[in-house]
Structure formats: structure tokens, C-alpha cells
Image (tube, grey):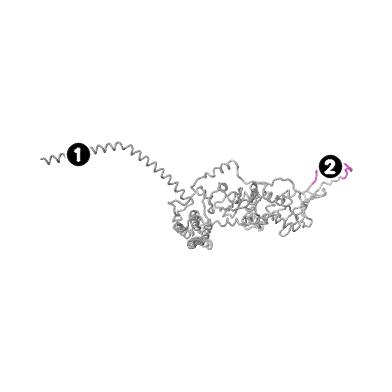
Amino acid sequence: MADNTEKDNLIETLLLERDEMYQELSRFRENDNGALDKAQSIIREQAATIKKLTDQLAWYRRKFWKSSSEKYISEDPNQRKIDFDGMDVLPEEQEVIEKAAKEIISYERKKPENKKKPVRLPLPDHLRRETEVIEPEGIDENWERIGQEVTEILEHKPGELFVRQIIRPKYVLKKELQEDHEQSEGEETKERKNVKIASLPLLPLPRSNAGASLLAELLMGKYMHHLPFHRQIDMFKQVGVSLPASTVNGWFTSSSDLLRALYYRLRELVLSTDYIQVDESTIPVIDNKKQRAVKAYLWVVRSVMDNLVFFHYDKGSRAQKVVIELLHNYKGAVQTDGYDVYSVYENKKGVLLLGCWAHARRKFTEALKEDKSGAEYALEQIGLLYKVETMADDQNLDYAERAELRKKLAYPVQTAFEKWLVKYLPKTIPGGRMYKALRYTYNLFHRLSRYHLDGRYRIDNNPVENALRPLALGRKNFMFCGNHDAAENAAIMYSLFGCCKASDVNPREWLTDVLNRIPEYNDNYDLDLADLLPHKWQESTSQGKSN
């Protein structure tokens, strides 16, 4: 009986404890509902913040070392597409666009400025003269010749200076001439109204005695054969023709003004294409404030498909703002080296950046002495990519076939090579040449590998670098440009002569003809200056000869 009582008491005690625990748990749940909702809200906000920061981190990783989610390029080349979904307008371009809205940017057909008439020395008598007589229209038996006007123009043929003598006879009506004879002596002769003389043909520099062929020879001598003007002046002096340096420099400035509109038209055509290559190089320019030559820069832009090239000078700057203003309206593929200023176009809508395998190859060539085995392997892989291009050339493949060959053979090499770069990096000496070569190549690998997207895209930037060679030779001979204006004029000449070389056009024949014809184009806006560019000029000249 006693045992049953103890069991009942124990059960009752346990039941009471259970009830108390249940009531306590209920009170806790009622009090905690508000805190739980608040905690869940905080968790959601933190999750959104974490996602935002993760996206930003992914962008920075891609810019500097690629994001972890895109550590390697896609295994399948068909999954890679041209991404034109970037920002419509870069923040850096906003200022340029606003400025462009206020000032209409169009090529300027600028005529040579009227300057004070220089003191002109007579042309030497010993030079051969080619006489050209231009008779006025409408001359019959009622007109009598009373004199002539002679204009002498110094011209040039290879190995010879000669004078083009333009003779324009003057005529007056015989009736008026007879009245003059009947006038009494001492009486003032009245002004003749009926005098006829032919118009002087259009000359490149109307207030100068320099002919188109001489101007062409001077400009070609400096910007193609790299002979400074003072050397050419000495050469002319040896054949008995003295040309003051100030006169020759004036001819250069006026010729540049005459050709400036043609240069702007060339620039417009290049930037209207959808695939360009861009590079930059130094040019010494005198800084008046520093009283010495400073290192300035010329930018070169090449239209790959049209084989046209132009140079751009912006007060010698190499800053990012220059390329932003230069390309702010451009849409298409831009192939460059690894210079960081171009990175801004990774986020520009409608622009696709391409890299240059030749620059990556040079980095590994420089690393051969430091890490022969690693550098040789890298050069071997890059060599395989170039061999694919040789295969396409040998088989004379069109652009579509070339792109397919790249996907089949070159792209697998690239995917494996990129993974090797990552694995090999820890084995290198930080800051060493091999380390720099690996970092350079890996940081730009997305640009380097994109050339497979289109058979038109080149594997490297070498053609635009070749366009810079005359500039490098010029630096050794000219020593410097006198000021920013002279450097801008040099950009015009390098551009036009560069197009002559690219199109295999005789620069002497082209420039002589263009200097004779361009005054007409600058006076008549219905004519398209593009017809005077070397490649168009060559087409029209060839058609004229065939007809």
C-alpha cells in the first residue's frame, strides 16, 4: 500500500514539472515571435548586401586577375560570344560627349592662311625652263597682243630642278590701242578696260613659287626618306638653288594646311569601320617652357580590312583621356597591346577588345635567360597558335573557314595553356621576368583568345606596329619637332604617306597630282575628298589608263 502511494506521488510530481515546462515554453514562444521576425529581416538585408559585394568583388577580380567563377576561358569556343551588353556611355566619356554636342565635329576644309608676301629671290637663269603658253579665249583679228605675264614655278623631277614657265599673253582691242596712239604726248593714258588675259591655273600655294612636284619631293624626302629639311636645302644649294630655311618651313606649314581636310576625311573613314588596331609611339617635341625636347606621343589607328592608317597627335599626351576622346563614337573590335588605358573599353557597349600574341611572345623571349625550360614551353605553345595561322594561309581559307580552323586546333591549345599559366606561376620568382610574362599573359588572356571569334581578326597587332617604323626612323634623323603644331603637321604627313605604302602607291606621283588638284576640292564641297586618298586615286588612275 505504501509503495503504491509513493508511485502516485512521483507521477504527480512529474506531471506538475511537465506542466510547468510546457507553460514556460509557451511563454518563451510568445515573447520570441517579434525577435524572430526581426532577425529574419536582418538576415535578408545582409544577404542582399553580401550579394552586392560579391558582384563587385567578381568585377574587380575579373579586371585584375579574373573572377573565380571565370578562372579559365570556356572549354567550348562556341559558348563565347561578343559581349556588347556593357555600359552605353562610360563615365569618362560623358565630358567628351557633352563637348561634342556643343561643337559639331566634322572635317574642316581649311585653306592656307593669307600671310605677308615674302621677299622672293629670282629663280636661277641656268635652270632649264619648260614653257607653257596659255592663250585667253575669244581672241580674233580684232585683238592685238600688247605684252605678257610670266609666272615661274620651281619644279622637280628625280635628279633635276627645272622651272615651269607659265606665259599668259595680254591682248587689247585694236580700236582701243589706236585711240591710245592718237593721244597727245603728255596727256595721261586712260585705263584700258578691254584687256584679255588667260586665268592663272590653280596652284597649290598661290602666293608661292613652289610647284607641286617640288613640294612633293620635300615632303617625301623628310617623311619617307627621313631627310631633315636643312639637309635637303644643302642638296639644292649644290645644284645652284638657294632656298631659305624659313621659306621651306613655310611651304611645309601651308602644304599641311592644304592637306588637312584630306587627313580628316581619312580619319573619318578609318573610324567608320568595325575592326581597328591601335598603338602609340614617342616623338620628341620642343617644350618652350622647359627649353628642351620632351617625349611626346603619336597615336596610330589602322583599319585592318581597308588597310588605311592615320596618326593622331594631342599635344603629345599618352593619357587615357586621349584614347577616350579619339574613340568615343567607335563601335567594333579594337586590337591593342597590354597598355592599361585601353582597359576602360572592356565595359563599353559595342566595343570588343582584342589582344596581341606577339607582345606575349616577347615577354617569354625576354624570360629565356631566367627560366629556359618554362619560357621555351610557353614559346612552343604560342608557336602552335601561329602555325595554325600558317595553315590557314597555305590553304587560302576564307574568313569563316579560318575561324573554324581556329576553333578546332588553336582554341584547345589556348585552354590548356591558360591552365598551365596558373599552375606554373607559383614556381616563379616574384618580380622576375618569367613571373611578369605569366602575369601579363594571364591578365590579358580573355583578349588574347578572342581572335578565334572572327576569321577577320588577326592573331597579333604587328601590322599597326609596322606603320610606326617610319616614325622611329624619323626620330633618329629629325631629332625633334619644333612645337606642337609641327608635330600635328607631321601626323598628317605620316598618315598620308603611310596609306601610300599600304596601297603600294607611288608617293611622288600621288602627292604631285593631289597637290595640283586639291585646291579644286577645297573650293567645291560637292566633290568627295576620299577620291584623292591613295587607294581610291590608284583605282581611278588605273581605270583612266585602261580607257
As drawn, the residue found furthest toward the right would be 185
Local crowd size for mark 1, using a 10 Å CA cut-off: few (<14), some (14–19), many (≥20): few
Q: Position of residue 233 (x, y in %)?
A: 72, 55
Q: Which mark is residue 15?
A: 1
- Whether residue 257 appears in magenta in the rendering, the answer is no
Magenta range is 181-195
Q: Residue furthest left?
A: 1
Please state the horizontal and vertical placement of residue 374, each as a whole percent of the image.
Answer: 48, 61
Looking at the rendered structure, which numbered label has been put on residue 190? 2
Quadrant of the snapshot with the C terminus: bottom right
- Type of the residue with mark 1: Leu
> Quick one: SS at disc 2?
loop
**Is 372 situated above or below 62?**
below
Q: Nearer the viewer, residue 355 or 505?
A: 355
- The answer to which of 147 and 379 lies nearer the viewer is 379
Position of 141 with respect to 306 (left or right) is right
Say whether residue 158 is left or right of residue 175: left
The three-letter code of the residue at mark 2 reads Lys
